[in-house]
Image (spheres, helix red, strand yellow):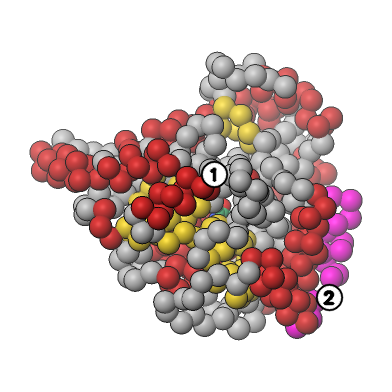
C-alpha cells in the first residue's frame, strides 16, 4: 500500500512522466496476473460498472457485502442492476456462506412482512430495500470485496455461488495481493476482477482503476479510451503534495482545517465524489505508478489495508483524539454503506444486517500515515474505549 506518500513520494508523483507504452505495459501485466482481458478505467467504480454490464442483464440482482462503500452501490445502479445487501460477520467484516444463505432464505418472508408493515403505515425506517420485493430467482451475481484485505473463505463462497448459479465478481479495491485461505490469489477466481487505484486503496495512485474480464463477456464492452479531464488529471497530480502539507500541519492542529479548505476550493476531491465515467481512461502517469505498485506487491506480501478496532462512545473518543492532535478525518465506514453523506440515497436494509450496523457504529480505523511510535498516545486513549472482549495491543 502506497497510501502514505511519505518521504518525498509526493515529489515523484508530481513529476512522473507517463506514456502510452506505460498503459500498454500495465494492461499486459494485468492480463498475465489475472489471466484475462484488462481495460484501464477512470476509477474503481467505473471498472465495476463495466464488469457488471459485461455479465448481467438489466434488473438482475447482485449480492453485495452489507458493509461497503457508496462507490459499489453507485456502480451497481449505473449498470442498471439491483443490490441485495448481505449481513457480515463481525470477525471478518465480510459476508459468509452462512449469512448469504440466510439472506436468500429470508427473502420471501421479508416480502410479506415488508408489505404488511408498509400497509399498516406503522413502518418508518429505511429497511425496505435489499430487493425484498421479489423472490430470489433473479439473483444472478455476487461481488466479493475482502474488506480491508481480510479474505473470505472463497471455497465456501464458490460452493454457494455454484449452488445458486451466481457469477462471481472480485473487487480488489481493498485486497490486491491478498491470498484466500486455500492459497489462491484474490482476483483469480471470479468471472471478472475489478481494481481501484484510488486514494487509500491497496494500489494507490490517487485515482484510476481497471477491469479484467476473465470469462467471455455476455455483452460487448467498449474499452475506455477518452483522455481524463485536465482538472481531474491536475487534482491527481497535486493531491499527494496537499496530503503531505496537511500531515505536517496536523501536529499543530491545522491539518483538518487545510484539508477542508482544499476540498472547498475543489483543489482536492473527496474520494466518494470521484465521478463515475465508463468512457475515460486514467492518466498515463497513473498507469505507470500503478504498474510499479503491482510489481511491488510481490515483495511486500499480503497487505492489511486498515487496522481497526471496535470502541464504545466513538464520538467522545474522536473528540479526545483530536485534542491530542490526531486528525481522524479518514474514518472509514461510519455507516454500513459509506460515506455518511450518501447513505440516505441507499435505502439500506438495516434490520436484515444487524452486524453491519453494529460494526459501522463502533469501528475506528487508525490513520495509515502515522508510524507506530507516533500513534502511541492515541493507542493508549483508544484502549480505554475498547469494546468488551477486545484486546488492546
Ligand atoms: C473505493 C472502493 C471501490 C471503488 O473505487 P473508486 O476508485 O473510488 O471508484 C470499489 N469497491 C470498494 C470495496 C471500495 O472501497
The stretch drawn in magenta includes residue 10: yes
The residue at the point 57 percent across, 63 percent down is 193
**Would you say residue 244 is visible in this rendering?**
no
Question: Which residue bears the numbered disc 1?
Answer: 152
- Which tag, 2 or 1, sits closer to the chain's start? 2
* Range shown magenta: 5-20
Vertical placement of residue 390 versus 157, above or below: above
Which residue is at the front of the view, 295 or 224?
295
Report crowding for label 1: few under 14, some 14 to 19, many 20 or more residues within 10 A (C-alpha): many
Considering the numbered disc 1 on the image, is that residue within a helix, a strand or a loop? loop
355 displayed left or right of 365: left
Question: Which residue bears the numbered disc 2?
Answer: 17
173 displayed left or right of 144: right
The picture places residue 226, in percent across and down from the top left corner, at 60, 83
Vertical placement of residue 90 versus 258, above or below: above
Vertical placement of residue 389 versus 238, above or below: above
The picture quadrant for ligand 1 comes to bottom right
Amino acid at each position: 500500500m502506497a497510501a502514505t506518500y511519505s518521504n518525498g513520494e509526493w515529489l515523484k508523483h508530481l513529476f512522473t512522466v507517463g506514456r502510452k507504452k506505460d498503459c500498454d505495459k500495465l494492461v499486459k501485466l494485468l492480463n498475465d496476473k489475472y489471466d484475462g482481458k484488462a481495460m484501464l478505467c477512470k476509477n474503481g467504480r467505473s471498472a465495476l460498472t463495466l464488469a457488471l454490464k459485461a455479465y448481467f442483464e438489466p434488473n438482475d440482482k447482485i449480492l453485495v457485502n452489507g458493509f461497503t462503500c457508496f462507490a459499489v452501490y453507485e456502480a451497481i445502479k449505473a449498470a442498471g442492476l439491483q443490490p441485495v445487501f448481505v449481513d457480515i460477520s463481525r470477525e471478518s467484516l465480510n459476508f459468509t456462506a452462512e449469512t448469504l444463505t440466510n439472506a436468500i432464505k429470508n427473502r420471501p418472508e421479508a416480502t410479506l412482512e415488508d408489505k404488511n408493515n408498509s400497509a399498516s403505515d406503522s413502518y418508518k425506517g429505511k429497511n425496505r430495500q435489499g430487493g425484498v420485493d421479489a423472490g430470489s430467482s433473479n439473483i444472478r451475481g455476487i461481488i466479493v470485496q475482502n474488506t480491508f484485505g481480510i479474505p473470505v473463505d472463497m471455497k465456501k463462497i464458490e460452493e454457494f455461488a455454484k449452488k445458486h448459479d451466481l457469477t462471481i465478481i472480485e473487487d480488489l479495491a481493498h485486497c490486491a495481493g491478498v491470498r484466500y485461505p486455500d492459497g489462491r490469489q484474490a482476483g483469480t477466481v471470479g468471472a471478472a476482477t475489478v481494481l481501484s487505484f484510488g486514494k487509500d486503496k491497496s494500489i494507490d495512485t490517487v485515482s484510476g482503476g481497471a477491469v479484467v474480464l476473465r470469462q467471455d463477456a455476455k455483452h460487448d464492452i467498449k474499452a475506455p479510451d477518452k483522455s481524463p479531464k485536465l482538472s481531474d488529471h491536475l487534482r491527481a497530480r497535486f493531491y499527494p503534495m496537499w496530503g503531505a502539507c496537511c500531515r505536517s500541519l496536523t501536529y499543530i492542529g491545522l491539518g483538518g482545517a487545510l484539508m477542508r479548505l482544499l476540498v472547498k476550493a475543489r483543489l482536492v476531491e473527496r474520494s466518494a465524489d470521484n465521478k463515475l465515467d465508463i468512457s475515460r481512461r486514467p492518466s498515463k502517469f497513473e498507469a505507470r505508478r500503478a504498474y510499479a505498485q503491482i510489481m511491488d506487491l510481490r515483495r511486500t506480501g499480503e497487505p492489511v489495508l486498515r487496522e481497526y478496532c471496535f470502541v464504545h462512545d466513538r464520538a467522545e473518543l474522536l473528540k479526545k483524539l483530536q485534542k491530542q492532535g490526531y486528525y481522524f478525518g479518514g474514518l472509514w465506514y461510519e455507516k454500513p454503506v459509506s460515506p455518511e453523506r450518501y447513505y440516505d440515497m441507499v435505502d439500506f436494509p438495516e434490520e436484515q444486517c444487524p452486524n453491519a450496523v453494529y460494526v459501522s457504529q463502533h469501528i475506528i480505523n487508525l490513520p495509515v500515515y502515522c508510524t507506530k511510535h507516533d500513534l502511541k498516545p492515541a493507542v493508549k486513549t483508544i484502549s480505554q474505549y475498547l469494546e468488551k472482549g477486545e484486546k488492546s495491543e
